[in-house]
Amino acid sequence: MRTKQALAGLFLLTIALAACDPFYDEGSRLSQHVCNAAHQLQSDTVMVKDVLYSPRYGVHQTYRVTFGASRYCPQGKCDPLPGAPAQGAVTVHVEHGSSGTGYAHLRCVQVPAPLDIAKQNEPLHFFLRKENTLIILVALK
């Protein structure tokens, strides 16, 4: 009898854990999304790309996105821009889900100036521009 109860408990725990991602946070998610869009733009003929981002649990909440200024850093370890306190991460604060910080975009784009925006009930638009082989994150809307 105890074995059946233990198996039932283990089964329920497995289902509960499968429904959540312990490594998920919106900063990492957005940072990777920026990188994916930059790779697409790199192989595209257009020079500017308008990309949408919505938090995993939807836009029906207030959320804030902040990118620190950073240089393009394909090797993953670069000095900060002059006057910048540190290499620029993206931070996303959400009401629903997991707020967090991401760095993957540092290997894909340059962010020449800090960018910050608060959103509610609508997706974020971010704009990438291609200059030769460099992709630049130029604006948030």
Image (tube, grey):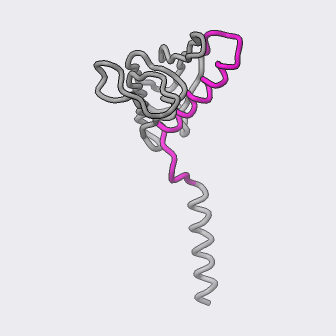
Give the answer, above or below, for where 98 lies relative to 119: below
Give the answer, above or below, for where 13 lies relative to 24: below
- Residue 22 point in image, percent of width and height: 51, 53
Residue in front for this viewpoint, 59 or 100: 100
Give yes or no for residue 30 being in the magenta stretch. yes
Residue in front for this viewpoint, 121 or 123: 123
Which residue does the image show at 59% across and 21% down from the upper left? 51
State the image quarter where residue 41 is shown.
Answer: top right
What is the magenta range?
20-49
Residue in front for this viewpoint, 73 or 43: 73
Query: Could you tell me how many numbered marks the image carries?
Result: 0
Q: Is residue 44 left or right of residue 33?
A: right
Which residue does the image show at 57% across and 75% down from the upper left? 9
Q: Quadrant of the N terminus?
A: bottom right
In the rendered image, the residue lying farthest to the bottom is 1
Which residue does the image show at 59% across and 82% down from the upper left? 5
State the image quarter where residue 46 is shown.
Answer: top right
Give the answer, above or below, for where 4 lies relative to 116: below
State the image quarter where residue 45 is shown.
Answer: top right
Give yes or no for residue 101 being in the magenta stretch. no
Which residue does the image show at 64% across and 84% down from the upper left? 4
- Residue 135 point in image, percent of width and height: 56, 17
Residue in front for this viewpoint, 76 or 18: 76
- Residue 140 point in image, percent of width and height: 48, 17
- Residue 63 point in image, percent of width and height: 43, 31
